[in-house]
Image: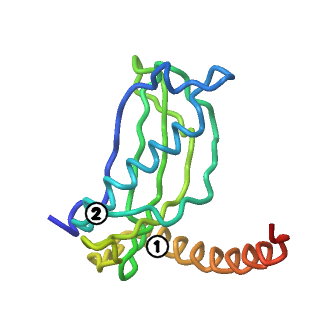
Amino acid sequence: MAGTERQLTLRFLAEPADVNFGGKVHGGAVMKWIDLAGYGCAAGWSGKYCITAYAGGIRFVKPIHVGNIVEVSAKIIYTGRTSMHLAIDVRAGDPKVAERALTTHCVLVMVAVDDEGQPTEVPDWKPTSATDIELRESAIRLMEMRKKIGVEMQAHLDLQPQV
């Protein structure tokens, strides 16, 4: 039921096909996992098909090794009219022990769309704990920063020579 499941965690083993030339899990594979968890969480919250509108602040903190158990956790931290901001944490470690280390963190913005691909409303999420209130406030601050970055990026694009 829409508006009831705020978070989701995917768990799986990092496979040999995920390895880069340096022998660690490829950043692109991690980004795919982030997108999958974000979609699952956003679709579960909204009850709608969702698309990724933004992925930002991706921090690769620690490498993931083949054979590690990987946990990709997605959590709604802010809802707009049609969008959902999610905090994503990727943790990994030896599957034989319970400890998982943070390897990657980022924020995603997902937008719910209707059958014609147009943005559609999502259930409102209201924070209740002090931690959730701070996460929501952080999402709002990041949204304001993205607007400023968008203006700067447009100026950069406007200065590019036309081919």
Q: Secondary structure at mark 2?
A: strand
116, 13: nearer the viewer: 116
Mark 2 to mark 1: distance in Å?
Answer: 23 Å
Q: Secondary structure at mark 1?
A: helix
Classed neighbour count for the residue bearing mark 2: other residues with Cα under 10 Å, few (<14), some (14–19), many (≥20): some
Task: Name the residue that disc number 1 marks.
Answer: 136
Q: Amino acid at mark 1?
A: Arg
Structure colour scheme: rainbow
The answer to which quarter of the image holds residue 45 is: bottom left
Mark in front: 2 vs 1: 2
Q: Quadrant of the C terminus?
A: bottom right
Picture residue at 63% right of the left edge, 20% below the top: 23
Q: Amino acid at mark 2?
A: Tyr
Classed neighbour count for the residue bearing mark 1: other residues with Cα under 10 Å, few (<14), some (14–19), many (≥20): many
Q: Determine whether 102 is above or below 117 in the image.
A: above
The disc at residue 128 is none
The answer to which quarter of the image holds residue 159 is: bottom right
* Mark 2 or mark 1: whose residue is earlier in sequence: 2
Q: Position of residue 11 (x, y in %)?
A: 35, 35
Q: Position of residue 60 (x, y in %)?
A: 63, 42
The answer to which quarter of the image holds residue 155 is: bottom right
Instruction: Name the side, left or right, on which 120 lies relative to 74.
Output: left
Task: Name the residue that disc number 2 marks.
Answer: 49
Q: Determine whether 22 is above or below 161 in the image.
A: above
